Image (cartoon, helix red, strand yellow):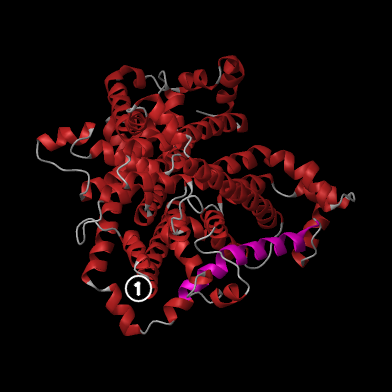
Amino acid sequence: MDAQIVKVKNKKGVRVIPGFGLSLGVTLAMLGCLVLIPLVSIFLSAAQLSFGDFIEVVTSRQVVSGYMVSLSCAFLAALVNAAFGTVLAWVLVRYDFPGKRLMDGLIELPFALPTAVAGISLTYLYSDQGWIGSLFDKIGIKIAYTRIGITIAMVFVGIPFVVRAVQPVLEKLDRQYEEAAMMLGASKLYTFFRVILPELFPALLAGFGLAFARGIGEYGSVVFIAGNIPYKTQIAPLLIMTKLEQYKYADATAIALVLLLLSFLLMFLINSIQIYMQKFSKA
Amino acid sequence: MSEKTKKAYETEETADGLHSIQKVIEPPHESSRPIIKYLLIGVCVLFLAVMLVIPLIVVAVNAFSDGWAAYQKAVMDEYTLKALWLTLLATVSAVVVNTIFGIFAAYLLSKFYFKGRQVLATLIDIPFSISPVIAGLVFILTFGNIGWMGDFLKAHDIKIVFAVPGVILATIFVTFPFVFRELFPVMNAQGKDEEEAAALMGANGFTIFRRITFPHIKWALLYGVILCTARAMGEFGAVSVISGHLRGKTNTLPLHVEILYNEFNTTAAFAVSSLLVILAVLILIARNIVEWKKK
């Protein structure tokens, strides 16, 4: 009875728990001062650019190639992570083997390891004198200072996103559907692609999106291995950096604004697909 | 498998831990095809070795390639220690600020319903989807010479860009949602019945938080703090934009690594990196302990 009264009160807007005003005030003040006000500056600053100038900056050959390098490498890296991330999540959830906990703990390494350290380490490893780079150099493949190197650095930073997105879903997955498929004579591979994968897909897509977004924005681990060759391995965040060093603030803002809109668009797209798929699977 | 039978196995097998339960409910066909199992494990081990483990070994090997004395010299260098100090300062600031924010924001969004709740949650997540370079750029556009607050700051002789406050602000920005994101799901799942009961019995806000909310969230809070520490300590892009690379003044450890590397002082760069690797490994261990406790 009491609970019911409380609920009715809540609907009318009377709050029982104290602290609404305080927590709302603190939250809005901190969010406003530390995130929103600085963020607004980028739009204020972009508004000072004339539309013609803006278009000229973001469609210049160097900038377009920067976007293309960032997008294509991040997309490829996210695909690689989606594949290996699913296998890793599968192995960690379904199998028992010595060292499993160590493997599980290692997944988070790219979160914990500073990106600059990862960057110089990967560059050293994949340069033509490095341990792995020299092996590929013999068969004529250069990794460091090419787009392959950029992709590898982006794979590095994106690994945890897919694994940690897929793992909990796989853990909760009811095995009776797989068992039913097996009983009906489906092969293991067929069961995986037709029964398990559709269940994992929303989570996989979320992980893919996060890894993709992280790859587009990534700077620290990519900048060393990219080598900064114009039109070839210049990534978009590096272009912003270069413009800033030349005190071309307007250009940097324009490039940043497009990059910002791209990542918002990406997140929106992935959210929409997820919502659509949830509706679809419920119906 | 029904919930009831699972329960039965659990009570029988808890002494052996979770793994034995998994074994029990694992269908028999799993063990009949061990080739696939070992093939997949092999793929994972190889992938993780190439992508994660070997880069760590590279750091260790190169850090000591000129011997212990050179390592010690690089690590005990005046600029390295100053960079370490600034890194710690920025990390602690970010953790303190973001913990305060995280607690208030998670409390607000999980215990109260109001218009714009969803919008607020989305806004908090913004720093997560922004390139670190852009995060640095927004502060230059706000507080720098060309920024709209630039004249005001100049008149009052306050330096933020290319100074320590800028480094701290950028670090706070990129780690802003970390604690909130860990706390919110836990607080949300806990609901608000207990708090409402306490409030109706006359407890004040602080007592409710301390006695009821906090015991539920302490492990999630610690987990968030650990993640925040990891990211704050290693932040490179945002800090790189705003610091101006003033050696001994606004250089953090990751920036110091970059400078040494670009000066072709590879051994020193890897030696300083090894400090960060040690911190990262400690963080990973702490993270795993907390995650284990959380369960």
**Is residue A24 part of the magenta span, yes or no?**
yes
Q: Nearer the viewer, residue A96 or B157?
A: B157
Disc 1 chain ID: A
Please give left or right for residue A149 compared with residue B138 in the image. Answer: left
Residue A64 position in % (x across, y down): 25, 67
Prevailing secondary structure of the magenta residues: helix
Residue B129 position in % (x across, y down): 45, 57
Badge 1: residue crowd in 10 Å (few <14, some 14–19, many ≥20) = many
Q: How many marks?
A: 1
**Is residue B69 part of the magenta span, yes or no?**
no
Q: Is residue A279 visible?
A: no
Q: Residue at x 41, y 18 (%)?
A: A98
Q: Nearer the viewer, residue B271 or A275?
A: B271
Q: Quadrant of residue B214?
A: top right
Residue B158 position in % (x across, y down): 60, 67
Please give left or right for residue A207 compared with residue A6 in the image. Answer: left
Q: Which residues are magenta?
A: A18-43
Q: Is residue B59 above or below residue A21?
A: above
Q: Is residue B211 visible?
A: yes
Q: Nearer the viewer, residue A278 or A151?
A: A151
Q: Quarter of the image containing the C terminus of chain A?
A: bottom left
Residue A126 position in % (x across, y down): 23, 38
Residue furthest to the right: B202
Secondary structure of the residue carrying tag 1 is helix
Q: Quadrant of residue A127?
A: top left
Disc 1: which residue: A251
Q: Residue at x 61, y 66 (%)?
A: A33
Please give left or right for residue B215 compared with residue B223 in the image. Answer: right
Q: Amino acid at mark 1?
A: Asp
Please give left or right for residue A34 compared with residue A260 in the image. Answer: right
